Image (tube, rainbow, N blue to C red):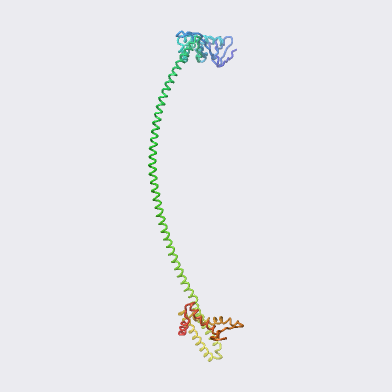
C-alpha cells in the first residue's frame, strides 16, 4: 500500500525503482512511495564547519609554515544537477563521512596554494590567500555537488622563527621610521615653532602699533570732543542766562500788567460804588418824594371824594350850606393838593430842599431827645464863675446852643447848607 514520506529543509529524499526512469530527488518536501517496488534514501543538507590544518608546508621560498583555515560547506539541494552529483558521491554515507571527504579535499587545495605563495604574501595578504583557496577548491566541490559557503585563513605560524624575525625586521623598520619621523616631526615642529614665534612677534608689534595709533586717535578725538563739549556747555550757560533774563523781563511785564489790571479794577469798583451811591440816594430821597407826592395826591383825592359823598348825603338837609362848604372844602383841598404837588416838584428838583424838609421835620424830635435827660433829672447842681446867665436860663441856653449846632452837623454830614436851603424853600413857597 503506497504512503507519503516527508523531510525537513535540511535534508533531501531520493526515490528510485518502479515508475521512475531516473531517481526522484525532493529537498525539504514530501513524496509518494510504494513499498517493495520503490526505495527511499535520505541525504543530509546541513552546513558543515571544517577546520583545515596544514602543518609544515613549504612555501614558494622554501620556508616551512603551518596554516589553519576554517570553511563552511554544504550539499546544494536546490540545484538538481549538483544534488544528483552529491547523491552519486555521498548517498548512503553518513554526515561524518561527508565531512571527512570535504576536509581532505579542501586541505589538499590549501597546501597547494601555500606552495605557490611566499610567507610574506600569506602573512600580509590573508584575503588574497583565502580567495585563491576558495577559487581553486570550488571547482572540485561543485563536481561533488557541494558548495563552499565561506573560507577564512584562521592562523599562520612557523617553528623556525621566520615570522618572528620578519616581525622583528618590520618592527625595527617601523621603529626606525618612527624615530626618523619623530626627528623630522621635531625638526618641522621647531621650524614651525620658530615661524610661529616670528609671526607672533610680528603680530604683537603690529598689534602694539595699531594700539598706539588707536590710542593717539582716541586722545585726538577725545580732545576734540572735550573742546566741543566745553563750547556747547558755554553756549548752553549763555543761552540759559539770556533765557533767564528774558524770563525775568517777562515776569516784570506780567507784574506791571497785573498792577494795571488791578488799578483798572479798582477804578471800575470805585465807579460802581459811585453808581451805587447815586442809586442809593435816588432810592432814599427821590423815590420817597415821588411816593409821598403820589400818597398826598391820592389822599387829597380820597378826601375830596369822601367830602363829596358826605355832602351828597347831607344835601337834602342843608343843600345850600352843603354846597358852600363843599365848594370851600374842594377849593381848600385843591389848594393843598397843588401846594403839595408844588412841594413834591420842589423836592424832586431840589434834593437839598427835600433833605432840609426832612431835617426840619426831625428837628423837634432831636430837641426832645436832647431835653429828655433833663426831664428825668431830680436834682441839678450848677457851678458858675459869675459870668453869664444862671439857673434855668443857663440850661435852656445850653439846649439852644446844641440845637443851633445841628445845621453845622447836618452840613458836615450831608454837605447841605441849611441856611441857603431854607431861603430857597421860602422863595419856592
In the image, residue 150 above or below residue 416 = above
**Identity of the residue furthest to the right in this view:** 378
Q: Position of residue 197 (x, y in %)?
A: 41, 28
Q: Is residue 88 visible?
A: no
In depth, the one of 317 and 389 nearer the eye is 389
Q: Is residue 422 visible?
A: yes
Q: State left or right for residue 341 relative to residue 381.
A: left
In depth, the one of 356 and 217 nearer the eye is 217
**Identity of the residue furthest to the front in this view:** 385
Q: Quadrant of the N terminus?
A: top right
In depth, the one of 158 and 205 nearer the eye is 205
- Residue displayed at 56% across by 89% down: 314
Q: State left or right for residue 362 relative to residue 222.
A: right
Q: Position of residue 392 (x, y in %)?
A: 57, 86
Q: Position of residue 394 (x, y in %)?
A: 55, 85
Which corner quadrant of the image does residue 178 belong to? top left
Total marks in image: 0
Q: Position of residue 104 (x, y in %)?
A: 52, 9
Amino acid at each position: 500500500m503506497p504512503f507519503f514520506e516527508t523531510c525537513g529543509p535540511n535534508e533531501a529524499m531520493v526515490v528510485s525503482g518502479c515508475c521512475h526512469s531516473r531517481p526522484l530527488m525532493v529537498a525539504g518536501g514530501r513524496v509518494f512511495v510504494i513499498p517493495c517496488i520503490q526505495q527511499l534514501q535520505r541525504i543530509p543538507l546541513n552546513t558543515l564547519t571544517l577546520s583545515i590544518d596544514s602543518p609544515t608546508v613549504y612555501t614558494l621560498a622554501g620556508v616551512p609554515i603551518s596554516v589553519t583555515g576554517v570553511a563552511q560547506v554544504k550539499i546544494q539541494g536546490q540545484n538538481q544537477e549538483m544534488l544528483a552529483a552529491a547523491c552519486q558521491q555521498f548517498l548512503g554515507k553518513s554526515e561524518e563521512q561527508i565531512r571527512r571527504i570535504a576536509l581532505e579535499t579542501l586541505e589538499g587545495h590549501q597546501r597547494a596554494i601555500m606552495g605557490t605563495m611566499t610567507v610574506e604574501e600569506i602573512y600580509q595578504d590573508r584575503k588574497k590567500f583565502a580567495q585563491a583557496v576558495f577559487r581553486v577548491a570550488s571547482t572540485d566541490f561543485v563536481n561533488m555537488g557541494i558548495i563552499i559557503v565561506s573560507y577564512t585563513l584562521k592562523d599562520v605560524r612557523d617553528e623556525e622563527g621566520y615570522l618572528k624575525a620578519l616581525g622583528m625586521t618590520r618592527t625595527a623598520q617601523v621603529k626606525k621610521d618612527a624615530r626618523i619621523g619623530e626627528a623630522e616631526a621635531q625638526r618641522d615642529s621647531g621650524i614651525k615653532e620658530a615661524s610661529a614665534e616670528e609671526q607672533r612677534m610680528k603680530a604683537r608689534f603690529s598689534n602694539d602699533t595699531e594700539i598706539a595709533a588707536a590710542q593717539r586717535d582716541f586722545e585726538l578725538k577725545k580732545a576734540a570732543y572735550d573742546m566741543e563739549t566745553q563750547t556747547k556747555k558755554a553756549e548752553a550757560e549763555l543761552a540759559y542766562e539770556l533765557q533767564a533774563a528774558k524770563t525775568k523781563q517777562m515776569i516784570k511785564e506780567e507784574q506791571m500788567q497785573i498792577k494795571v489790571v488791578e488799578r483798572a479794577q479798582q477804578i471800575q469798583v470805585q465807579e460802581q460804588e459811585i453808581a451805587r451811591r447815586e442809586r442809593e440816594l435816588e432810592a432814599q430821597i427821590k423815590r420817597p418824594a415821588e411816593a409821598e407826592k403820589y400818597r398826598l395826591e391820592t389822599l387829597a383825592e380820597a378826601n375830596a371824594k369822601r367830602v363829596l359823598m358826605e355832602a351828597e348825603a347831607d344835601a337834602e338837609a342843608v343843600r345850600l350850606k352843603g354846597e358852600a362848604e363843599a365848594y370851600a372844602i374842594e377849593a381848600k383841598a385843591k389848594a393843598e393838593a397843588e401846594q403839595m404837588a408844588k412841594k413834591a416838584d420842589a423836592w424832586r428838583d431840589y434834593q437839598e430842599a427835600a433833605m432840609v424838609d426832612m431835617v426840619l421835620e426831625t428837628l423837634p424830635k432831636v430837641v426832645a431827645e436832647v431835653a429828655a435827660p433833663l426831664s428825668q433829672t431830680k436834682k441839678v447842681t450848677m457851678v458858675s464863675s459869675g459870668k453869664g446867665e444862671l439857673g434855668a436860663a443857663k440850661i435852656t441856653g445850653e439846649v439852644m446852643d446844641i440845637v443851633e449846632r445841628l445845621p453845622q452837623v447836618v452840613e458836615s454830614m450831608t454837605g447841605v447848607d441849611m441856611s441857603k436851603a431854607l431861603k430857597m424853600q421860602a422863595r419856592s413857597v
